[in-house]
Amino acid sequence: MRKHLLLFLAIIVLGAGAYFSERSFLSSQGDSLALQGVSLGALNAASEKSTGIEFTLIVGEELYEDNVPPGSTILDAMNILASSTKFRFTSKDFPGMGAFVESINGLPAPRSARQAGKIAADGYYWILYVNGAKAQQGISTIIVNPENSVEWKYEKGY
């Protein structure tokens, strides 16, 4: 019984030593990086970005590119592009249906198009194309795939 107690105590001491050694090492790495002007958050973001999925969005003649985390929807990717490029958009979320794009780069959908279920006076909308075909799902549900071509076109539709 005494052997087991000593063995258990030795495991606890060694485990605690390993834990605190690792914390000390990581802390000293963070301090040396801080002295170099690099934050751990920036390193994590850069690491995530480099391991992300390359996403390209075409809007008219404009091409927007960035890396997005795996599992991102097109809506997630568009939000990332809006924060890192000149790409801008507005959308409205409809519960149970997802997001509806109202404007891209200042070109709005007609006012009546923003009202769910109503036809626009001039019939123009932002239409999402994936691999050259009109999307069958919305931007809230389509997961980014690096092999897909994603494009928005402002045209008569629906």
Image: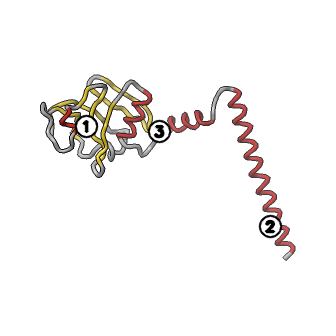
Disc 3 element: loop
Disc 2 element: helix
Please name the residue shown 36% across and 32% down the image: 56
Mark 1 or 2: in front is: 1
The image shows residue 13 at horizontal and vertical percentages of: 81, 58
* Disc 3 residue type (three-letter): Gly
The part of the image, by quadrant, that contains residue 27 is top right
Q: Which residue is mark 1?
A: 128
Mark 1 or 3: in front is: 1
Q: Residues within 10 Å of mark 1 (few under 14, many from 20)?
A: many
Q: Earlier in the sequence, mark 1 or mark 3?
A: 3
39 with respect to 27 (left or right): left
Whole-angstrom CA distance, mark 1 to mark 2, is 62 Å
Disc 1 element: strand
Q: Residues within 10 Å of mark 3 (few under 14, many from 20)?
A: some
Q: Earlier in the sequence, mark 1 or mark 2?
A: 2
61 with respect to 122 (left or right): right
User: Could you say which is closer to the camera, residue 46 or residue 79?
Assistant: 79
The part of the image, by quadrant, that contains residue 124 is top left
Please tell me whether residue 13 is drawn above or below residue 58 in the rendered image.
Answer: below
The image shows residue 17 at horizontal and vertical percentages of: 79, 53
Q: Which residue is mark 3?
A: 52
Q: Are marks 1 and 3 in contact (CB under 8 Å)?
A: no
The image shows residue 138 at horizontal and vertical percentages of: 28, 44
* Disc 2 residue type (three-letter): Phe
- State the quadrant of the C terminus: top left
Please name the residue shown 33% across and 45% down the image: 140
Farthest-out residue, right: 2
The image shows residue 43 at horizontal and vertical percentages of: 59, 34
Whole-angstrom CA distance, mark 1 to mark 3, is 23 Å
Q: Are marks 2 and 3 in contact (CB under 8 Å)?
A: no
Q: Which mark is residue 8?
A: 2
